[in-house]
Amino acid sequence: PHTAVLDQDGELALAGIGATDLAGRFDTPAYILDEETFHARARLFRDAFSEAFAAVGSTVDVYYAGKSFLSVAVARWARADGLRVDTCTGGELAVALRAGVPGAEIGLHGNNKSDSEIARAIDARVGRVVVDSHAEIERIAQAARDAGRTSDDRVPVMVRVTTGIHAGGHEFISTAHEDQKFGISLTGGQALDALQSVLAHPELELLGAHTHIGSQIQDAQAFEVNARKMLGLREELRAQTGFLMPELDLGGGYGIAYLPGEVPIDVRALATDLAQVVASVCTELSTTVPRISIEPGRAIVGSTTVTLYTVGVVKPVTLEDGSVRTYVAVDGGMSDNIRPALYDARYTARLANRTGSAETVRARVVGKHCESGDIVIPDLRLPADIAPGDLLAVPATGAYGRSMASNYNHVLRPPVVVVDRGEARVIVRRETEDDLLALDLG
Ligand code: LLP
């Protein structure tokens, strides 16, 4: 879905604006975010899931996972596209509220919510607080009572359940992933206990159960197996208590393409498959699920953004076997994209200001940080005549790029520049040295 196209000189244009023009106006490095792509992806999730689940009698809420990238503008777009906003800290909650998203359209996650985060969420009357542990249930109930909430005015909660499925990349394993910090396990009746405990608190309203099985998942089957487990849990709770949870949240984690040739998950096919799974289980149990929710982040914002860098030093390095690798250093690196260093994540890059020579060299794109692991792309072919001053574009950096950016080495975090039909504007400005020094009290 990239709207990037090459003009006749081989220059990259993003939403109709040339890379050289963007670099001249906004400097580099910069995240260039295509607004149209965001809306298209957001609406695709909304429409695909709503339509597929309408056929089985469920309405769908899509919560945009703010951790992937959140700003006031983006929260407003999500709302305009009919999405809600998922937050997992007081900071993300503050951005969503600043954007004017009504509390009822915000969810709050977190495995270790502070008292003030819980109180603030209750005060903002968020649509749901997602319980992550047994211990939290009583804390949320206490905070609800402190805020004067009663059985007539309950705080809506979901319980995050660990179904034992942990997926990501291209594989999923259906057992043995219990050893992690999130949620409450299905095993030993723990999730069931938590749901019953919520039901026993008069100031809490149990909306349903929530599950999130991983990120960058390409295998639709993992979601299907997970959905079956959640429907099973819902049935168990009904058998024990008579209470039929009105909602199930199937989480986020839908994979995108980072490299040429990679196939992103097909959102429409996934929605249809999942709806069929829910329908067939529901038919067996002669029930329906009134509400389904999902929480995609990466699959909405990931492909919206290209990072533009300027090439600095180009250094041929002779390797032990006598071959040469050309190190191409750019003006950012692990501070604006930690994913290669943290997860071995792979990206591609292309020369953005011109075509470059047909002859290519074996290259490695590195950053400017004082660390040899500061690698943007370990191995790729680049035009042999790549030179200082050239622009490099790295696509698919919209998710977990700016949101995980750091000030390592006191590097200033890049701006987020929105491009839309030939117009460009900044939605998050570049940091300044004054911003950094403002925190340093000497
Ligand atoms: N909902 C919950 C409860 C989550 O924990 C997450 C992601 C999401 C939704 C959104 O997942 P998405 O659709 O974006 O995959 N920093 C890592 C990804 C961490 C994801 C954590 N949870 C990365 O850069 O790959």
Image (tube, helix red, strand yellow):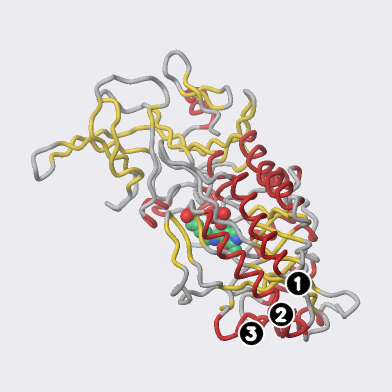
Q: Which corner quadrant of the figure contains ligand 1?
A: bottom right
Amino acid type, mark 3:
Ala
* Residue 193 sits in quarter: bottom right
For label 3, the crowd category at 10 Å Cα-Cα, with few meaning under 14, some 14 to 19 and many 20 or more, is few
| Residue 227 in the image, given as x and y percentages of width and height | 61, 64
Which of the pair 336/52 is nearer the observer? 52
| Image height of 24 relative to 315, above or below | above
Amino acid type, mark 2:
Leu
Q: Quadrant of the N terminus?
A: top right
| Image height of 180 relative to 279, above or below | below
Which of the pair 81/55 is nearer the observer? 55
The residue depicted at 61 percent of the width and 79 percent of the height is 133
The furthest residue to the front: 284
* Residue 388 sits in quarter: top left
The furthest residue to the right: 152
Secondary element at tag 1: loop
Secondary element at tag 2: helix
- Residue at image mark 2: 237
In contact (CB < 8 Å): disc 2 and disc 1: yes
Sequence-wise, which precedes: disc 2 or disc 1? 2
The circle drawn on residue 245 is 1
Q: Closer to the camera: disc 3 or disc 2?
A: 2
* Residue 357 sits in quarter: top left
Disc 1 residue: CB within 8 Å of ligand 1: no
For the residues marked 3 and 1, what is the alpha-carbon distance in whole angstroms?
Answer: 21 Å
For label 1, the crowd category at 10 Å Cα-Cα, with few meaning under 14, some 14 to 19 and many 20 or more, is many
The residue depicted at 79 percent of the width and 62 percent of the height is 290
- Residue at image mark 3: 135
Which of the pair 256/65 is nearer the observer? 256
Residue 288 in the figure: left or right of residue 401: right
For the residues marked 2 and 1, what is the alpha-carbon distance in whole angstroms?
Answer: 8 Å
Sequence-wise, which precedes: disc 3 or disc 1? 3
